[in-house]
Amino acid sequence: MIVKDKHLTTIWYDNSSDKIKIIDQRLLPHEIKFVELKTLQDVCFAIQDMQVRGAPLIGITAAYGMYIAARENSDTNYLKDASIKLKNTRPTAVNLSWAIDFIFSKIEDLNKDNLLTTILNLANQMRVDDIECCEAIGENGFKLIQKLYEKKQSTINILTHCNAGWLATVDWGTALSPIFKAKRNNIPVHVWVDETRPRNQGFNLTSWELINENISNTLIVDNVGGHLMQHNKVDLCITGTDRTSSNGDVCNKIGTYLKALAAFDNEIPFYVAAPISSIDFSIKDGLKDIPIEERDSNEVSSIYGINSKGQQDIINIVPKKAQCKNYAFDVTPAKYITKIITEKKNVDPTTESISTLLE
């Protein structure tokens, strides 16, 4: 997408240097820094420490991670160990295991002489496919915004949670893609952006994306969403997902469940933008079977930003010896979701409707 009149993507292969390059998202919006991933350890760190984040982008990064692993050692056992290390970095996002398993399915009986080229080609194609997938999600989600605009004939107010824009994918994004499409089709939109504690992906990433695309937005703390819905200031909600079960339960950034409850109580449509690769067809009950990542408690007890001297800093914000828990995701039951927006079509959050995506 556009940053200071320049088109950027989150990850790419540099043919001239044979390096994988990413944007270090930990530093945004204060600094744009490009990082080279040279080793498998670099890739694991990038995923685990959230230099890259968002389920689709994590999957693409893991695919390139398999290329880097094969470049280090093409032995089958080494690649299997590498895949385990990659999968353990972020257990909730299903795209991670999906990407790795897809690559293994294509190289099982492959001659070692063709291994490197094959894995790189697969990763590059997955990157292209992700861009096309997210743009298609944008088109399908735009239809829902357009329908509402035709009825309302004034600015559409949208609430989103966390960051499911282009920074969470290769380009376009999932939840923000329909909003970008609405902007390009001259439909007036305004976005309420949740802070999304504890890492503040809404404040740091979503708002930054929208500002760069000249889309009206307002930052709010996480607990304001329900108040806005009660006072008719939200027309619809759109979020992304890190893993959606076959029955329509949606696992997304912690706090999504509470937004869905408020939307349901106020009869506001709650949409989830989900690439088919983020749907785990093997899981029938998201509440019981989706693993919930618990991250370092320091993310809760401290906050990153720019201090009074204009320097990037990490500030402690809790009492000494305070105990913190940091659950990264929650699961929203299917009954609170209006539609799931995929690259293929918009489906109901039911087993029957979701299963048609495999046809």
Image: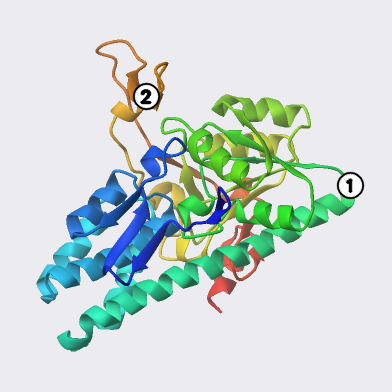
Which residue is found at the position 37% from the left and 16% from the top?
A: 317
Vertical relation: 68 (above or below) 147 = below
Which residue is found at the position 48% from the left and 46% from the top?
A: 252
Residue type marked 2: Gln
* Picture coordinates of residue 129, whole percent (x, y): 48, 72
Which residue is found at the position 34% from the left and 19% from the top?
A: 315
- The mark closer to the camera, 1 or 2, is 2
* Picture coordinates of residue 344, whole percent (x, y): 61, 71
Vertical relation: 124 (above or below) 58 = below
163 with respect to 308 (left or right): right
323 with respect to 112 (left or right): right
Q: Which residue is mark 1?
A: 153
Q: Which residue is mark 2?
A: 311
**In the rendered structure, which disc, 1 or 2, sits on the residue that comes first in sequence?**
1
Q: Secondary structure at mark 1?
A: loop
Asked which quadrant contains residue 348, the reply is bottom right
Q: Are marks 1 and 2 in contact (CB under 8 Å)?
A: no
Which residue is found at the position 18% from the left and 54% from the top?
A: 41
Residue type marked 1: Gln
Asked which quadrant contains residue 211, the reply is top right
Residue 306 visible? The answer is yes
Q: From mark 1 to mark 2, how far is it between C-alphas?
A: 45 Å
249 with respect to 237 (left or right): left
